Image (spheres, rainbow, N blue to C red):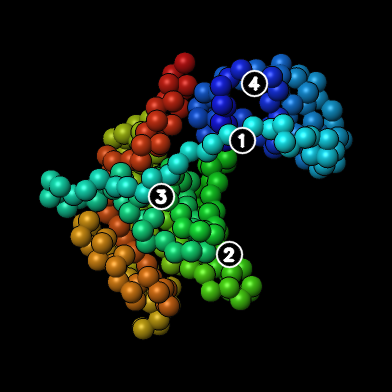
Amino acid sequence: IWWVVSGTEDLILTIGAINSDFNTGGFSYKTSQLNTIDFHSTHIAVRYSEYPGVHMRGVLRKIIGKVDHKQLSPVPGPIAKNKFPENEDNVPTITQAWIWPKIGEFLKEKDIVVTETGTADFGILETKFPKAVTAISQVLWGSIGYSVGACQGAALAARDMDEKRRTILFVGDGSFQLTAQELNFGFVICNEGYTIERFIHGFDATYNDIATWSFKDLVKVFGAKEGTYKTYQIKTKEEVKKIFGDEDFTAADTLQFVEIYIPKDDAPRALKLTAEAAATKNRS
């Protein structure tokens, strides 16, 4: 993630940076390689010269030892505001702009939150986390479906460490269909297909559609015993508020699986901006 303060820096140090489309906001960064040093695990690049075998760990240790921290000016970070649009028009439909800040009210300290490549990865940027929440996300390879198994692994790791933490998954319906057998506590965003692909290319193309599944019935299909799980189908804002305010639901003492329905022509603001940049790049 690039965050350039002014664009007039004397020296830029990047640590493990991979300048892919998603990592750079559609290659929107304006920095020059002439005043950049890139640190990687197996090599270091100074301007346009690459030094193989020079590892970042040793070099960074020496830099830290030489830098006078008192001479560094602190840079304020962005302030997250956990606000969501009020339902003043009495429209019950769940929207992307409304749901993600609302999720911040549902999360608890030390939760583990796993977000899928696509809608969830961009939507979660609008969610304010409580203290000590662990976020698991990846967009580098665009590997849809990864999050379902990743959530299972995170939950097992937390259990092995004897930590009582909720592990919560947010995944799109299309991505979930690739790795559904790893089903666990999560929210499946039911919006009729590959939303991010619709906004990049082919909004109404059939290749961005998916078959309609009865997702919540999969819990039973995969052998869960009656009384060991709960399933929900959420289609309105009031239903969201109801389950988020339900103490049994927030306690998460059993496997819980939620279908949450959002219109297919809706997307998080960050996704729309990124998709627009990607589409423009593809046309150039």
Foreground disc of the pair 1, 3: 1
Foreground disc of the pair 2, 1: 1
- Tell me which numbered mark, 3 or 4, is placed earlier along the sequence: 4
- Residue 27 image position (x, y, % from top left): 54, 24
| Few, some or many residues within 10 Å of mark 3 (<14, 14–19, 20+) | many
- Residue 79 image position (x, y, % from top left): 45, 41
Which type of secondary structure does the marked residue at label 3 adopt?
A: loop
Residue position for label 4: 9
Q: CA distance from mark 3 to mark 4?
A: 31 Å
Which type of secondary structure does the marked residue at label 2 adopt?
A: helix
Q: CA distance from mark 3 to mark 2?
A: 23 Å
- Residue 72 image position (x, y, % from top left): 69, 32
Q: Residue 153: which disc?
A: 2
Residue at the image position 55 percent from the left and 68 percent from the top:
155
Foreground disc of the pair 3, 4: 4
Q: Residue 74: which disc?
A: 1
- Tell me which numbered mark, 2 or 1, is placed earlier along the sequence: 1
Foreground disc of the pair 4, 1: 1
Residue position for label 3: 127
Which residue type does callout 4 highlight?
Glu
Tell me, yes or no, whether the two marked residues, 2 and 1, touch with CB atoms within 8 Å: no
Residue at the image position 36 percent from the left and 37 percent from the top:
269
Which residue type does callout 2 highlight?
Gly
Can you say whether 199 is above or below 135 in the image? Answer: above
